[in-house]
Every structure is written in structure tokens, then in C-alpha cells.
Image: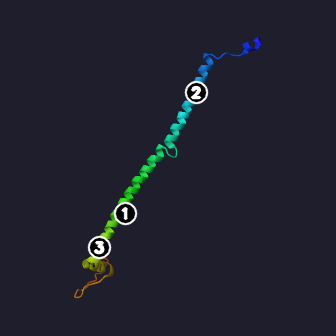
Amino acid sequence: MTGSANKRQPIGPKTTGRTRQIAKLLLVLFAIVIGVDALVGEQGLVAIREAGRQHDDLVAAIARKQAENAGLAEHVQRLQHDAGTIEELARKNLGFISPGEKVFIVKDVPARTQP
């Protein structure tokens, strides 16, 4: 038995140093994987920045729609309470005229070419 006990290698500084190197390497790899996931993962920095851009675009779109809505509400108010607005639209879109007015239709004539 004494002969087989001599064949075992004692645990010394070489074995411990190599184990530490492997552990450090594994920790570094783990940190790299975590870092890459934090940047490009589903909840990563890239996804968060894209969500922020989408949020800003949606806020701007909502502001535009609210302004458009306010303009349309003002137009409805004028149509309901201002006879001048209705008259203006009837003249512009339907060609209506008031009693006593005369309509002149001017046709464009192509310019003559001089010889």
C-alpha cells in the first residue's frame, strides 16, 4: 500500500492555481454573457432605447391628433353657429350665389403664337 500511496499526487500550489484560473475564466465568460444579454436581450438596453423612441413617436402622434381634433371641433362649432361659414362653404363648394348677384364665367383662351 505504501507504493500506491506514493503514486498519488499531492494537492499543491500547481493544482490550486489551475483551479483558480479555470474559475476566473468561467466568471469572465459568465460576465460576458450577462453583459451581452443586458445590451441586446429581450429587456436589454437596445430594446429599452427602441421602446423609448416608439414612446416619443406615439406621444407626438397623439399631440397631432389632439390638435386636429381641436380644429375639427372648432369647425363644427362655426358650422353650427355661424351662418357666414355655411354661406362661404356653399359658395366655394357648391357654386351658390346670393339673390341679386351676377355671375361672370371667365374662360381661359390659349395665347396666340406670333408668326
| Residue type at the position of mark 3 | Gln
Whether residue 67 can be seen here: yes
* Crowd tier of the residue under label 2, counting other residues whose Cα lies within 10 Å: few below 14, some 14–19, many 20 or above: few
Colour convention: rainbow
* Viewer-side label of 3, 1: 3
Q: Earlier in the sequence, mark 3 or mark 1?
A: 1
Give whichever of 87, 18 is nearer the camera: 18
Which residue corresponds to mark 2? 23
Q: Secondary structure at mark 1?
A: helix
Name the spot of residue 13 as percent of width and height, x first: 60, 16
| Residue type at the position of mark 1 | Lys
Q: Earlier in the sequence, mark 1 or mark 2?
A: 2
Which residue corresponds to mark 3? 77
Numbered mark located on residue 65 in the image: 1
Q: Earlier in the sequence, mark 2 or mark 3?
A: 2
Name the spot of residue 26 as percent of width and height, x first: 58, 30
The answer to whether 65 is drawn above or below residue 110 in the figure is above
The answer to whether 92 is drawn above or below residue 43 in the figure is below
Could you give the CA–CA distance between mark 3 and mark 1, rounded to whole angstroms? 18 Å
Residue in the picture at 35% in, 59% down: 63
